[in-house]
Image: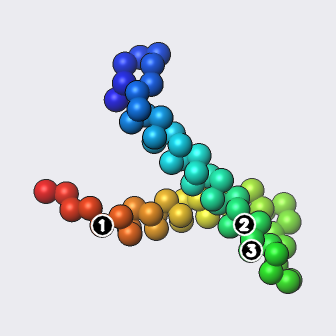
Amino acid sequence: MSEKYSLNKTDLIAIAKGAGLAVGGVVVTYLIELIPNVDFGANGELVAAVLAVILNFARKFLEGKNES
């Protein structure tokens, strides 16, 4: 963790990963809506947020690091 009012490289990488996951949720939502007869309507933002959480879960699940 960096000092107050500053960011180190680790912080910037974590921010970039979070932004990537958020954008990934939006992209997946857009791609799903391209399927005929799929329309999330006013719930599109909620679906994008849920998909971002699912992407983060999948990333962590597949990461495969052992903590000892």
Residue type at tag 3: Ile
| Up-down relation of residue 44 to residue 14 (above or below) | below
Q: CA distance from mark 3 to mark 2?
A: 5 Å
Circle 1: element type: loop
The picture places residue 19, in percent across and down from the top left corner, at 59, 46
Which image quadrant is residue 37 in?
Answer: bottom right
| Up-down relation of residue 40 to residue 42 (above or below) | below
Q: Which residue is mark 2?
A: 29
CB within 8 Å, label 3 to label 2: yes
Residue type at tag 1: Gly
Which residue is painted at 39% across and 36% down in the image?
A: 10
Residue 35 relative to residue 25: left or right: right
Residue 11 got which mark? none
| In front of the other: 40 or 19 | 19
Which residue is painted at 62% across and 52% down in the image?
A: 22
The picture places residue 39, in percent across and down from the top left corner, at 84, 73
| In front of the other: 43 or 33 | 33
Residue 32 got which mark? 3
Residue type at tag 2: Thr
Q: Which residue is mark 1?
A: 64
Which image quadrant is residue 66 in?
Answer: bottom left
The picture places residue 29, in percent across and down from the top left corner, at 72, 66
Front label number (1 vs 2): 1
Circle 2: element type: helix
Which residue is painted at 45% across and 19% down in the image?
A: 6
10 Å crowding of disc 3: few (<14), some (14-19), many (20+)? few
| Up-down relation of residue 23 to residue 58 (above or below) | above
